């Protein structure tokens, strides 16, 4: 049983910034400022467009199953396009893209083990320059996420190695599960490293008493595109034998340096899962497609405005228009003065109604 206690620290995050000539003094902030969304759209080179087309043909997926004769379960996700979408939407710095990508992938892995159809929310409440990272996923494979300061940049840990822990800082990980009855269960654990995979493993052990190995990786190209992203969760089921504990520990250790590299090399999910699980016989129980998707819409944001009340809407009308930006996906919703007036009326009539439960 001693091994079980040692198991959770085998959480590993690997991110590679694919630049060989990058040095400690390289100013990523300046690099980022030169690239705004409009520039990217206009200056996208031809081979990049072709590459994105090839990437789109490869769907992101999440598979679950068991191994070691049913004494353990695994969830493997490939999230390259999903992380690329999040990074593009938030115009994220490389370290922010890595943190958002790891957390979104981690949220998907946890959601896959979740019996409820509801959402799972991971909040990384660290005091680093990212000022917190949040991801929401469900077991159907839908995920969204953001960092409070997606442009935050920190010095590289060493050439080519992003320092996610420094960007996240010290704090805690809070995990909220939406249960089928509509209630939420929230558990927290202190951040053990800020590298995210280890923090999720620590949470699973402390709060849910499930010994787990979590591996997350995001590989980022020189041009800030996501080359590959993926994750693996290995969990011991109750009554797992010592040999299973040892087998999983060994597997997690063997894989520690290469999950994003594997996701980059293995173009189909079969090959990716086979490489992740190695020689261990495994079953596949479920296959899901994975995609970045947000639940926001013009009408949802209109409802939020209505809830703000007549007075607040009047202030917006005085400004001539309102623009609301969704935190999760950075989508902008504009409301013209006449639309605001209509909402103001609805807010007025809503206030006149008696309270409903
Ligand atoms: Zn949104």
Image (cartoon, rainbow, N blue to C red):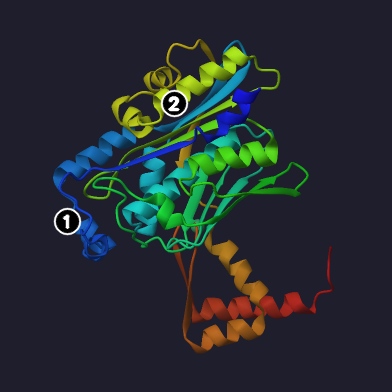
Q: Check whether the beta carbons of the residues at disc 1 and disc 2 lie within 8 A of each other.
A: no
Residue 182 picture location, percent across and down: 75, 48
Comparing 307 with 1, the one in front is 1
Residue to which mark 1 is pinned: 43
Q: Residue at x 76, y 78 (%)?
A: 351
Q: Which mark is residue 33?
A: none
Q: Is residue 163 left or right of residue 297?
A: left
Q: CA distance from mark 1 to mark 2?
A: 42 Å
Q: Residues within 10 Å of mark 2 (few under 14, many from 20)?
A: some
Q: Is residue 151 left or right of residue 338?
A: left
Residue 285 visible from this viewpoint: no
Judge whether 215 appears above or below 318 on screen: above
Which of the two discs, 1 and 2, sits closer to the camera? 2
Q: Residue at x 30, y 45 (%)?
A: 161
Residue 240 visible from this viewpoint: yes
Q: In the rendered view of the protein, which quadrant contains the C terminus?
A: bottom right
Judge whether 326 appears above or below 3 on screen: below
Q: In the rendered view of the protein, which quadrant contains the N terminus?
A: top right
Residue 54 picture location, percent across and down: 26, 34
Q: Residue at x 56, y 41 (%)?
A: 200
Comparing 138 with 173, the one in front is 173
Comparing 78 with 314, the one in front is 78
Q: To which quarter of the image does residue 27 belong?
A: bottom left
Judge whether 294 appears above or below 13 on screen: below
Whether the residue under disc 1 has CB within 8 Å of ligand 1: no
Q: Residue at x 74, y 74 (%)?
A: 350
Residue to which mark 2 is pinned: 253
Q: Is residue 314 left or right of residue 94?
A: right
Of marks 1 and 2, which one's residue comes earlier in the chain?
1
Q: Is residue 92 left or right of residue 44?
A: right
Secondary structure under badge 2?
A: helix
Secondary structure under badge 1?
A: helix
């Amino acid at each position: 049983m001693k091994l079980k206690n040692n198991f959770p620290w085998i959480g590993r995050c690997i991110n590679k910034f694919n630049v060989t000539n990058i040095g400690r003094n390289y100013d990523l902030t300046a690099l980022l400022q030169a690239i705004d969304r409009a520039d990217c759209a206009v200056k996208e080179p031809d081979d990049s467009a072709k590459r994105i087309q090839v990437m789109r043909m490869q769907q992101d997926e999440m598979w679950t199953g068991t191994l070691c004769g049913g004494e353990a379960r695994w969830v493997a996700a490939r999230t390259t396009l999903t992380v690329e979408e999040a990074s593009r939407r938030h115009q994220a710095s490389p370290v922010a893209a890595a943190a958002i990508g790891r957390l979104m992938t981690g949220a998907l892995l946890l959601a896959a083990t979740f019996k409820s159809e509801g959402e799972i929310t991971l909040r990384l409440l660290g005091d680093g320059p990212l000022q917190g990272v949040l991801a929401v996923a469900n077991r159907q494979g839908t995920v969204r996420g953001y960092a409070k300061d997606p442009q935050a940049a920190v010095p590289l840990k060493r050439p080519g190695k992003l320092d996610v822990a420094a960007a996240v800082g010290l704090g805690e990980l809070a995990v909220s599960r939406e249960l089928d009855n509509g209630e939420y269960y929230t558990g927290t654990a202190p951040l053990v490293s800020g590298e995210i995979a280890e923090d999720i493993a620590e949470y699973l052990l402390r709060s849910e008493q499930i010994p787990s190995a979590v591996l997350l990786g995001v590989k980022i190209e020189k041009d800030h595109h996501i080359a590959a992203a993926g994750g693996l969760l290995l969990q011991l089921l109750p009554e797992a034998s010592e040999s299973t504990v040892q087998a999983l520990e060994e597997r997690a250790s063997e894989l520690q340096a290469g999950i994003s590299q594997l996701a980059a090399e293995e173009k189909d999910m079969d090959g990716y899962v086979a490489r992740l699980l190695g020689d261990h016989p495994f079953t596949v129980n479920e296959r899901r497609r994975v995609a970045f998707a947000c639940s926001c819409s013009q009408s949802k944001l209109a409802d939020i405005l209505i809830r703000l009340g007549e007075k607040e809407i009047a202030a917006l009308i005085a400004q001539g228009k309102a623009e609301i930006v969704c935190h999760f996906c950075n989508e902008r919703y504009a409301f013209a003065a006449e639309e605001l007036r209509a909402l103001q009326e609805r807010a007025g009539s809503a206030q006149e109604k008696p309270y409903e439960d």
